[in-house]
Image (cartoon, rainbow, N blue to C red):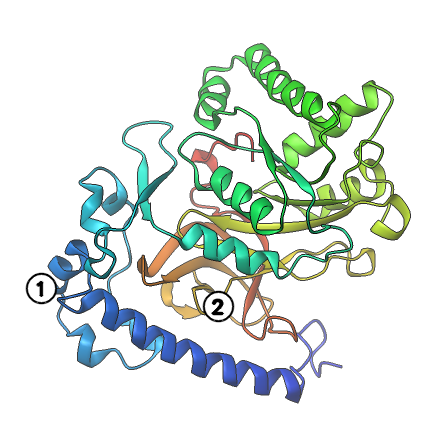
Amino acid sequence: MSLVEGAPAPINPEVQAAAAKALDQLNEHTLKTVHWHFSDNTGSPFWLEKKAELNFDPLTDVKSFDDLKKFPHFEDEWLRGGPINRWVPKGHAGKPVYVFETGGTTGIPKSRMVIEDHWKDYELFSDTLPDEHFPKGSNWLMLGPSGPRRLRLAVEHLAQHRGGICFCIDLDPRWVVKLIKKGWMDHLEEYKKHCIDQAVTILTAGHDVKCMFATPKLLESLGEALEEKGTSLAEVGIKGIFSGGTEFTPQWTRFAVEEMLGGPPEEGGVFMTPTYGNTLMGLACSKPITAADGYKISYYAPQPRAVTEVVQFDDYNTKVGYGETGRVKLYTLTDEFFVPGFMERDEGEREQPFETYPWDGVSGVRPFHELASATTVGVY
């Protein structure tokens, strides 16, 4: 029990020990990552050039993860426009390169260079999926944004990594956002129906699809479309769903589990897990959600490859206390991409480490209140 009413309970000794070990691993990984990105023979042109502007030497002055605060905050404008090659580390020269875009409803989209990170991130995520509900060898449906987005290829790799084949639909989220901004709601409904029709066709065509990704809005629409046809996600063979997006709230999760999916997996037969991710970070997994916990959703970044902190609104270098609200700060630490502190367009509450993920998490993720009025939520 906590000594203060409403305050978080103390972290048990086993989790504290695991958290200390995870921090040691993070410090070691940070040092290795910084040396890779700022060494002349392995670093990217962008960071080698940026090194000259810094008032410290990353190769000698960064000795731990906490030292990343010495860097200026990463600006998303750095990702707009090219040449994209400036982000390719010299240590990966000659390897095939992907470019994934995020945003871009107006102006130049943000682009991230990727070589294998999307494979590695989703292979790690695969290890968290229960085989009972995501059977190995099963085929998948990818019901989400396509085109130049990481998610489409990442989910396809996840399916292949688990021994299955991925079926994808055509979906342009930029067009969705434009329809919303123009107030063309009839067009929006028709486009959503067009996307859902593609998914229903795949699920009812005998392809033995058992697993899927969908954004919350699209998953709800798919459930309604199947219901109109006198069937359901469970009846067409779906056993496991992973989903992600800003619409993933406890209220929506309660509706999805209790009404759309017919109850928890042992009753309705369908397991659903929420995720939080983006093109910079990869994929943060959720602590198991239960009715007993009010369907609370807590996300944990895939340390040490990525880290999230919940920081004070007026001081982005200081974390809030457990259970307190702040803005989400992201770090990406792979040998392909280095982000020493990016201020996300989200806020939430800081969560304690636990057995599975012995490091800080974030719950209640929602648009950052200072930007929320300017944020248009489309298919997510």
Identity, as a three-letter code, of the amino acid under mark 2: Gln
Secondary structure under tag 2 reads loop
The spot of residue 30 in percent (x, y) is: 34, 73
Q: Residue furthest right?
A: 267
Task: Name which quarter of the figure residue 200 lies in.
Answer: top right
Q: Which residue is mark 1?
A: 52
Percent position of residue 213, x then y: 63, 40
What x and y, as percent, mark residue 96? 30, 46
Quadrant for residue 201, please give it: top right
Residue at position x 73%, y 50% from top? 135
Between 218 and 250, the residue placed more toward the observer is 218
Q: Is residue 46 above or below residue 374?
A: below
Rendered residue at 58%/87% (across/down): 17
Q: Given the image, on which type of amino acid does mark 1 rest?
A: Ala
**Is residue 259 found left or right of 336 in the rendered image?**
right
Q: Which residue is mark 2?
A: 303
Horizontal arrangement in the rendering, residue 112 relative to residue 78 (left or right): right
